[in-house]
Amino acid sequence: MENIQIIYLLGFIVSLIAVVTPIIKLNTSITKLNVTMENLNRIVLQSEEKVNNHETRITLLEIGGK
């Protein structure tokens, strides 16, 4: 290989690393956000179920008190 081809090859490898590294970091961040959103969604659904249970109990107390 000639010197110029080696320089082009090294330039290509450096450019490839410069492009791939942020993409990998972005993918990692997106994965973490997805996991966080799934956990938050589960927590909201549990809270919603508790609120519904409380509303049912309040309704029964109101009906029984009349």
Image (cartoon, rainbow, N blue to C red):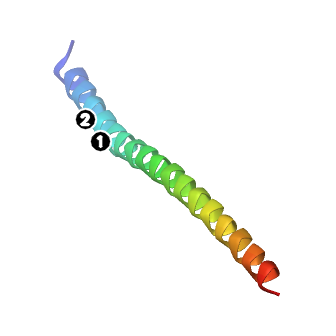
**Classed neighbour count for the residue bearing mark 1: other residues with Cα under 10 Å, few (<14), some (14–19), many (≥20):** few
Report the label total: 2
| Helix, strand or loop under label 1 | helix
Which residue is the site of mark 1?
Answer: 18
The x, y position of residue 30, in whole percent, is: 45, 48
Q: Name which residue lies at 25% across and 35% down.
A: 14
| Residue lying farthest to the left in this orientation | 3
Left or right: residue 16 compared with residue 41: left
- Of residues 64 and 45, which is closer to you in this image? 64
Left or right: residue 26 compared with residue 46: left
Left or right: residue 40 compared with residue 52: left
Residue 27 versus residue 62 in the image, above or below: above
Which residue is the site of mark 2?
Answer: 14
Left or right: residue 17 compared with residue 66: left
Q: Name which residue lies at 30% across and 38% down.
A: 15
Quadrant where the image shows the C terminus: bottom right
Question: Disc 1 vs disc 2: Cβ atoms closer than 8 Å?
Answer: yes
The x, y position of residue 13, in whole percent, is: 27, 29
Q: Quadrant of residue 52?
A: bottom right
- Of residues 64 and 19, which is closer to you in this image? 64
- Of residues 38 and 3, which is closer to you in this image? 38
Q: Quadrant of residue 8?
A: top left
Residue 64 versus residue 11 in the image, above or below: below
| Helix, strand or loop under label 2 | helix
Q: Name which residue lies at 63% across and 69% down.
A: 51
Circle 2: residue type: Val
- Of residues 36 and 51, which is closer to you in this image? 51
**Classed neighbour count for the residue bearing mark 2: other residues with Cα under 10 Å, few (<14), some (14–19), many (≥20):** few
Residue 1 versus residue 49 in the image, above or below: above
